[in-house]
Image (cartoon, grey):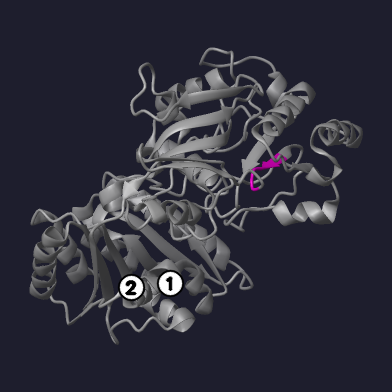
Amino acid sequence: MTTTDISTLATALRAVLGDAQVISDRQELRTYECDGLAQYRVVPALVALPRTPAECAATVRACVDAGVPFVARGSGTGLSGGALPHAEGVLVVTSQLRAIRAVRPEDERAVVEPGVINLHVSRAAAPFGYYYAPDPSSQQVCSIGGNVAENSGGAHCLKYGFTTNHVTGLEVVTPDGDLVRLGGPAPDAPGYDLLGAFVGSEGTLGITTEVTVRLSRSPESVRTLLAGFAGTDQAGAATSAIIAAGVLPAAIEMMDALAIEAAEAAVRCGYPAGAGAVLIVELDGPAAEVDAHFTDVERLCREHGAGEIRVAADDAERALIWKGRKSAFAAVGRISPDYIVQDGVIPRTALPEVLRRIAEISAQRGVRVANVFHAGDGNLHPLVLFDDAVPGQAEQAEEVSGAILDICIAHGGSITGEHGVGMDKVGHMPRMYSADDLDTMQLLRCAFDPRGLANPGKVFPTPRLCGEVPGRRRGAHPLQEAGLAEVF
């Protein structure tokens, strides 16, 4: 796309949004060059800041008319490069759509715009005795629209599930620029589950402009304990024993010694000294049930080698226990100049074997790995540490990161649990899926976006050229010539 084309599109967008809502200055555009995965950086051609769903739809229509790709972005906290801009496209930032339109405790629903911060939903629902269950570690800054795009989870996903389990309706801008509704306040609308397809589609099927979420009743009782173990084997065994005993905690989180070291350096959380691993176990629900299960959890932790157990006496102590875990990703910056946050899933029973294998690879390659993860459902978040200033270390870290995902796949797991594929994992998709699998998935994408303009280059390693049957193609496709797709 030429400078003249971009200038023409900028003029069209300013006519719709206003001058202040369209950014074209190169230095200002650099603010948006990456999301939370800073290894990938692209400066967008333009940034649009719509304030209403109608403005968002008009922005997409202008892009479609100009044949220009567009990428949606919320708070920019994603960790897979899902909101990485397109160099010749428009970045549509939804952070100004931040109204909480309704909180309806009688329906156990809230209606919010995509720029609303995750934690603010719970704050708005709290006076009515409700809260919003999905709680990513970045919940103080991440937006609901981004949570929908990535199907985010959080520490309490063991009991309460992911974003998809708490969204009943969406208003979205389709890749044609139309405003449509999927689902609604009632659960399980008839017909094909387009709502389920959209949640977790990482901006490839359109842009969210309104979300109807399910609210959960605030539990009668919440109890939290911190248990220190000699190593991850013992902590993993305790986790399996708790689940096997029929106890379903709201959360079971694990951190290894290196992650504990980072958390202590950053927030002085006071975890057990000398522990090779800690478990954070939180139970919630009716008081009688919580008390009974809590006794079981304490016993099982001790039977599996817990050297020290601390029980939070009040909300302040509970917050301190969680502070180390919630700050773990950022805390690693205290012990390493650079790091890769990985996200893979394995069966819970494979935890000891997989963690040992990660430790072996770490030792063999000379690359440190700090492990922080949702132990209850086997969602790993290994932090691969390196120094980008040292030649070769970044490449080594990437190799270790990829090897960890291969281990997850080999044990029947997945390359992502809640961070998404984005740009970071596109090369790993063929390791998990066959060519036929990937082509079938892209048929759905093409049904929504036949032009291939919505967040191109993400999720799939080789974008399917919509409108053509599978098989060997002859000649250059228009999208290939435009640089929006590549044929191998």
- Residue 313 falls in image quadrant: bottom left
Q: Which quarter of the rendered picture does the N terminus lie within?
A: top right
Counting residues from the start of the chain, the first of labels 2 and 1 encountered is 2
Q: Name the dominant secondary structure of the magenta segment.
A: strand
**59 or 384, which lies in front?**
59
Picture coordinates of residue 131 (x, y %)? 38, 52
- Residue 436 falls in image quadrant: top left
Q: Label 2 to label 1, Cα distance in Å? A: 34 Å
Give the magenta range.
Answer: 91-95
88 falls in the magenta region = no
Q: Does 220 sit left or right of 22 as displayed? A: left
Residue underneath mark 2: 315
Residue drawn at the location 53% of the way across and 50% of the way down? 80
Could you tell me if residue 346 is visible in this image?
A: no
Q: Does 278 sit left or right of 35 as displayed? A: left
Badge number at residue 368: 1
